[in-house]
Amino acid sequence: MATKKKKTSKPKKTSPKRAKLHGEVFFPSKEVIAQANLKDWDATAKRAGKDLEGFWADEASELEWAKPWTMVLDDSKQPFFKWFTGAQVNIVHNCIDRHLKTYRKNKLALVWESEDGKEERSFSYFKLNREVSLMASIIKSLGVEKGDRVTIYMGRVPEIIFAMLACAKIGAIHSVVFGGFSVDALQGRIADSASKLVITCDGSYQNGKLIELKRIADEAVAKCPSVENMLVVRRTGQVVTMQPERDHWYHELLESPVAKERFPTEVMDAEDPLFILYTSGSTGKPKAIVHTHGGYMVGTYTTLKYVFDLKDDDRWWCAADPGWITGHSYIVYGPLLNGATSFLYEGGPAFPNPGRWWQLIERYAITVLYTAPTAIRGLMRFGEDWPNQYDLSSLRLLGSVGEPINPEAWKWYYTVIGKERCPIMDTWWQTETGMFMITPTPVVPLKPGSGTRPFFGQEAEIVDEQGKPVKDNEEGYLVLKKPWPAMLRTIYGDPDRYVQQYWSKFPGKYMTGDSARRDEDGYFWIIGRVDDVIKVSGHRLGTAEVESALITHPAVAESAAIGLPHELKGQAIYCFVLLKPGQTASAELAEELRQHVAKHMGAIARPEEVRFVDKLPKTRSGKIMRRLLKARAQGLPEGDLSTLEE
Ligand code: WT7
C-alpha cells in the first residue's frame, strides 16, 4: 500500500549552544542521548587531543595481551610508525578465546542466511571457536606456517570468516580477494603475495546465478607457481575439477585426523602482520596494504564501540562484503572484539525482490544497519512500499560508508528506514586507515552528507597544492595529521611506494587522496578522489587496472578509463579506446570490449560505455590526461592545458 510521502523532519528547536551550527542540522533526540554509552563527545575529544597515547593505551587495556607493551607509539622511524611495541597478542585471542571465559561463551557471534532464504546457520562464540580451530588445524596441516600468505577467494558464507580467523589464529597472513573479481585480478594478487595456499568455494550464488569460483581460481593459479595447495569449501554442489595432490575438499579434511576441535592460538608480536588487502591506487598495479595484530585490533575495537555504540543485545549488520576493508574491520574483527552478534547475508540487496533486506531486518531484529549510499539509492528507486511492508522498529542506528551520501538518499534512509528515530553515522575512512577516521558518534549533531569531525585523537586538515591550510569552505587536499593505531604499516614488499604514495607530497602528513572542504563548524565534506581511483558503487577500482584489461584485447592499441558521475553507482567507468590499425570501430566491438573487461576483472569493472577515438590527449611526457577527458565528457572547463602535447 502506498503511503503519502512524509515530509522530512525539520531541525529541532535550537538551544543557544545548538544555534552555533550552520546549515541543516539534525540533533540527537533525548532518547538517543539517554541510550548513548558515551555522552560527552567534547570531553573525550579534548582528552584524546591532549594525550593521544594515553587515550589509546586506555582503550588497549580493555583487551587482553599476552605481554604488555613497552611503548604505546614509536614514531622514531617516521613514516614507519609502530604501535604497542614490545607487546604480544593475537587478535583472535580477543575475538574469540577471551569471550569463552565469560557469559559470552554461549552468546551468538554470527548469524547467517543464504541467498534463497532457505538456510540459516548460527554460531555462538563457543561454536565459532570450534569452527575456527578446525579450519586452523587443517590449514596448518597443509604446510602453512606463521608469516605465510594465504589467499581467500570465496562467496559470502560463514566459512570465509572462519578462514580469515583461522589464518590469524596460526599467524598466517590472509589476503582476501573479493569474490566478485575475476581471473586477472585474482591472479595478480596471488602472485604478488606469493601465497602458498588458496582457499576457495566450488561456487557462489549471485542474484540467483552461479559464479564459478573454483574454475576462476584454477585459471588464476595455473600461472602462480607459489601455490602448493587449494582448499575447497563446498557451497553450490556444482561440478568442479579437483587436481589430485593440489586440491582438497574442506568437508573431507574435516572428517580426517588432521582436523582438531581444539587448537592453540599462536602468540604474535603486536606489530606482526595480520593481513594484506589489495586496493587500487593512482598508478600501476593494486597495492597490498598491511595491517597488524595489535594496532588494528585496538583501532577497530574502539571505533566500533564508540561510533555504533554497541551494546550486548545488539544485532549488528554490516552489509558489506568480507572481501573489502569494511568487511574485514566491521563484519569480522570489530564486532567479535566487542563480543557482538553479527549478521551476514549471502545475497545482494534486491534479489529476489527489493524487499529482501527489509525482510531480513525484521526477521533477525537487526538493531544497527551499516551500508553504502549506492545500496540506499538502488533500493530507494523501488519506492517506500517495499520497506513499509516490514517491521523495522528494531533499528536504533544507521550507518553509511564508501562514498559521499547525497542529501536525497540521506533523507530517504533517515525517514523511510530509520523513521526519523535513528541517527546516521556517516563514516569516512579507507582501506589504508583500517578504521573510521572522520565520523560522528550518536550524540553528535548531524549534517546530511558530512562525516562530521575526526575521530578521537585525530586531526584532519584541508591543504592546497603547497600544503598550506586553505580557508573554511574552500576545496583542497584532505590530510590527516596524527598517527592512529590501525594505520597501514607499509605496502607489502614495497616500502618505498608506501612513503612515496602517502607521505611525500605533504611531509609529516598522511595524504588521503581525497579532496574535501571543511565548513565553519569544523565539519568535513568529502568531494571525491583526486587521483585515478574510481568508486563504482562504493567499490574502489583503478583506471590502470581497467586499462590493462582492455589492452589484452587484440583490437586495442591504447585506452584511457575515467570515472563519471552516475545516478545509482556514484561513479561509472567510461573508456576511450584507440584501435589498432586495420580494426574498425562498431557498436558490436564496443560491447565486446565491455564484456572483455568484465570477464577479466569482474562484473563490477564492466565499463558503462566504450568510445572509440583517433587520439588520446597526452602530456608532452606521454602521460594520458584523464583529467581533460573527464572535463570534456562533462562539458566542464578544460583547465590548464600548458602541458598538453600539440
Ligand atoms: C575511499 C576509500 C573504508 C570504507 C570503504 C571504502 C571514499 C569512504 C566515505 C564517506 C565520502 C567516502 C573516499 C575514500 N569514502 N567513505 N563516508 N564519505 N567518501 O574504502 O575502498 O579504501 O575507499 O572511499 O574517497 O578515500 P576504500
Image (cartoon, rainbow, N blue to C red):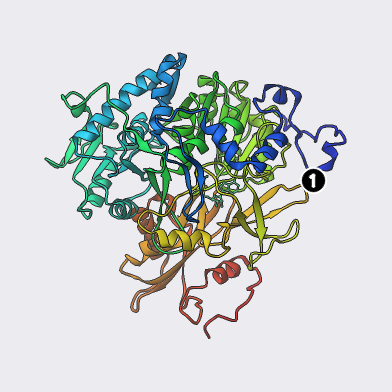
Task: Please report the residue visible at 34 percent of the width from the left and 42 percent of the height from the top.
Answer: 174
| Relative to 476, 352 lies left or right | left
Residue 21 location (% of width, % of height): 80, 43
Q: Is residue 549 above or below residue 350?
A: below
Q: Nearer the viewer, residue 206 or 33?
A: 33
Farthest bottom residue?
646
Question: Where is residue 617 shown, x and y percent of the image?
Answer: 51, 76
Residue closest to the eye, 51 or 328: 51
Residue at left 54%, top 45%?
Answer: 484
For ligand 1, tell me if the residue under mark 1 lies within 8 Å.
Answer: no
Q: Quadrant of residue 108?
A: top left
Q: Would residue 126 be visible to someone looking at this image?
A: yes
Count up the numbered dots.
Answer: 1
Note whether residue 574 is visible.
no
User: Looking at the picture, does residue 51 appear above or below residue 224?
Assistant: above
Q: Is residue 237 left or right of residue 392?
A: left
Amino acid bearing label 1: Gly
**Where is 526 relative to 293, above or below?**
below
Tell me residue 300's x, y (percent). 51, 36
Residue farthest to the right, as pictured:
16
Residue at (60% x, 37% y) in the render: 55
- Which residue in the protein does label 1 denote? 23
Packing grade of label 1 (10 A; few <14, some 14-19, many >=20) is: few
SS of the residue at dot 1?
A: loop
